[in-house]
Amino acid sequence: MLLKNTYNELIKILAKPRSYIGFIALTVLIGVILLAMKADGESFISFVTSSFEQTLSFNGLILNGNLIAFIILQMLIIHVPLLVALVTGDLVSGEAAMGTLRMMGTKPISRNSFLLSKFFAGAIYTFFLTVWLAFLSLIIGQYMFGTGDLIVLNSDGLVIIPENDIMWRYGLAFCLAYLSLLSIATMSICFSVFSDNSIGPIVSTMAVIILFTIIGSLDVPTFDHVQPFLITTHMASWRSLFEMPVPYDAIIDSILILVFHIVGFTALALWWFNKKDINT
Amino acid sequence: MKYILILVIGLFSGTIQAQDSGNDLLNRVVDKTNLVNDYSASVIITPDVPMIKSMPVKAKIYYKKKDKFKVVSKSIAILPKQGFTDVNVFLSDPKKYMVVEAGEKLIGTVQTKLLTVIANESSSEIILAKLWVDPDKAVVLASEVTTRSAGTVKIEYIYSNQIRFGLPSQIKFIVNVKEFKMPKSFSSNPHKSSTAKKNKRKVGTIVLDITNYIVNKGVSDSIFQN
Amino acid sequence: MSEVVVSVKNLKKSFKDFKALKDVSFSVYKNDVFGFLGPNGAGKSTSLRCMLSLIDSDDGQIEIFGKSLRKNRFDVLSNIGSIIEKPDFYKYLSAFKNLEIMARISGRQVSKSEIEDIIHFVGLKGREYSKFKTFSHGMKQRLGIAQALMHNPDLIILDEPTTGLDPQGIVDIRELILKLSKEQGKTVILSSHQLSEIEMIANRMVIINKGKSIIEGDVSELLNSSQMMVKFSCEEPERFCDVISNEFSNISEFNVTDSEIEFEINREDISEINAFMVHQKIKISGIEQKRKLEDYFIKMIQNED
């Protein structure tokens, strides 16, 4: 029944026009970034290398598809989760608002199966959105700008990663990005269980992301104790794959925190959904 | 009075003597480098600069008299801002500088002579160049060049089979990184807190290991075009 | 005695401080067309939601097909088809796709041809692939009935199934329900405000009010066929009343409105009164039998209040 209803959920997601907003938005956003970089990417590069240019010069193909993909991922760290929440935040509350939750609630499917099938469908949707993001940023970026070494700016300075050492990092980075987006999807589905209208869970998810991102970016010692546990802190953990050496311990910590959030939100949602009276 | 005059004349003649030997040595160095009309070579660039993490990079370098120089690399190569040809161009016109022999220093097993080259023109990019020269082989083993735009760069040279042209097999640049400041933008590291220890190293090196010189065989001008 | 299909005992449910169900009990037998009646806010919808596990009751027992609903949810719900309140479907999907989705989790195999058949059966032929959002209210109701029937359940629970249907549609549904009960041996629970519908097709009923069962039993027994309200229309209402009072001692209370006189009499007295009026040369322009169930219902509710 779980698999059958997961299939049902995918049909519903595919039929809803809003499901395509994410894909269209990504295409437009990334398209704009690619065109902007094509037109004036060099000045963007000098922003990255400006601190060093009094003493050093950088030779070689800096503005290449690998750097473009990194910039795109960097820029869209807040936006893509919102596109995910737009669909996943509506999965339960949308049905409550439409009245179909009442219809489906009378069917011989357990509430656990019903809700888990929504989680799985949401996970599949998030996966394809991530794949689309990877395709547009990396594949199209490499097609337009070629390949080369990747120059990355982080708080420790510049890291230059050789071309032949990049693709496996991107592979893992997109896996981590998917895990981050999945945690957001799970959170929004959990919010959706508590609501009977479509907008509430989506806006709540957006608010949480924005608030936690702000707290995470404040360089204040007070927040040092809180930041390691924020979901948004670990949403940026994919960047660690572009350090030398790669801090695997820290990445594993991030994975565990994200998995903990996923399991926690799922458990909370299942608990409440089983308790809930369907009155809509 | 007579003794003072003798002392002054003695000192002055000493200075002139020092200048004359310094000029001679520098001329021998410049004559050697003037033997090179063009060359190409393979280079492995190994940076070790604080706040920059990079693997060694393979590149090709091309030179054509007197100031055409190009590094060709698909990988991102970090090089000092100060050009490779700046000193050569500066030294090619003796009227633009004054040379003073300013002592000696043992570098490795070679007792080098220190030549201080001072620009005569106030508009010159190179203000001062200190060259530690091997007097027997007439090659520069170390230098400290001060320019208007790039500050002071120290360089060390090692020579092997191209020493007759004054072409080194290894060049080591010593760069000062105390001026590097990171822009506070999207550079947050999720795995570091705000109280993390800062890197205290202020000096870095860029080593160029140069091999496979092809000297005076002709280099096309098209290589130097962007 | 027929087999008990549904047994509801002492059902209780509160929403925060509000006691929606205080003590609802009733039984439904095989092949029954069971009328589930009550005024607005009586707890009908809440009771039905408890029976369909949309709501968890605070106390009481619900057994369907002899099995506890709580412990055998899958088996029980696989054999029930229902419409609770208005039928809601996915607006952006076609009728066919909507039924396919429901069929996939109905607990039984329902083929594509069966889905097409049921769509045709409820009168939506030609609209299978139209999006649900383009449907009229009546068409939505028909689709709701289709999803309740498509997996061939033994128990059908219908909450106001004729709402929004045209007169022909109402007749069709009535005949369908009777057919389901008599020819296919299905049990139907029908909650409706159309008392005439209940009176016409239900054989048993329960009336609930303020969260409690008031009365349950056979429709015919409860309604006591001898007494009924009748409305006579005539030109001389005062004379009519005098004559009736004098000749029929068992009739004393009249409700007179313009040229209409309403009073309670035995069914067999109607023809006698009519003949007597003809004899007295009092012209009768109309005789109307008021709905028995409506009276009974109102009487029961008022007694309870």
Image: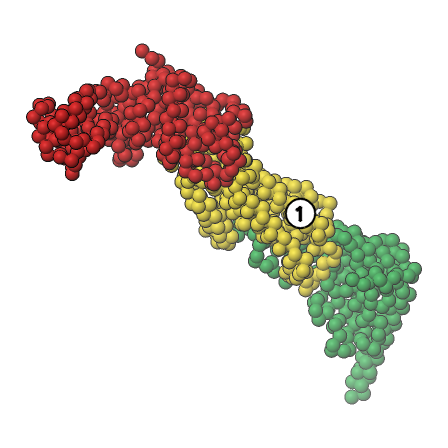
Q: Residue at x 24, y 18 (%)?
A: C221
The colour style of the image is: by chain
Q: Which chain is green?
A: B
Lateral position of residue A33 relative to residue B206, left or right: left
Task: Give x and y (percent) for residue A204.
Answer: 44, 46
Q: Chain of mark 1?
A: A
Query: How crowded is the residue under tag 1: few (<14 C-alpha within 10 Å), some, or many (20+)?
Result: many
Shown colour of chain C = red
Front one among A232 and A252: A232
Q: Which chain is yellow?
A: A
Height in image: C148 above or below A75? Answer: above
Residue to which mark 1 is pinned: A138
In this rendering, does residue C188 appear at all? yes
Q: Position of residue B182 (x, y in %)?
A: 60, 58
| Identity, as a three-letter code, of the amino acid under mark 1 | Leu
Between residue A172 and residue B46, name the one nearer to us.
A172
List x then y, in percent, for residue B28.
89, 68
Q: Which residue occupies 87% across, 65% down?
A: B33
Location of the C terminus of chain C (image quadrant): top left
Q: Residue furthest top?
A: C1
Q: Residue sitting at 50 percent across and 38 percent down? A: C131
Q: Quadrant of residue A19?
A: top right
Q: Quadrant of the N terminus of chain C?
A: top left
Asked if one can make out residue B166 in the rendered structure from this viewpoint, the answer is: no
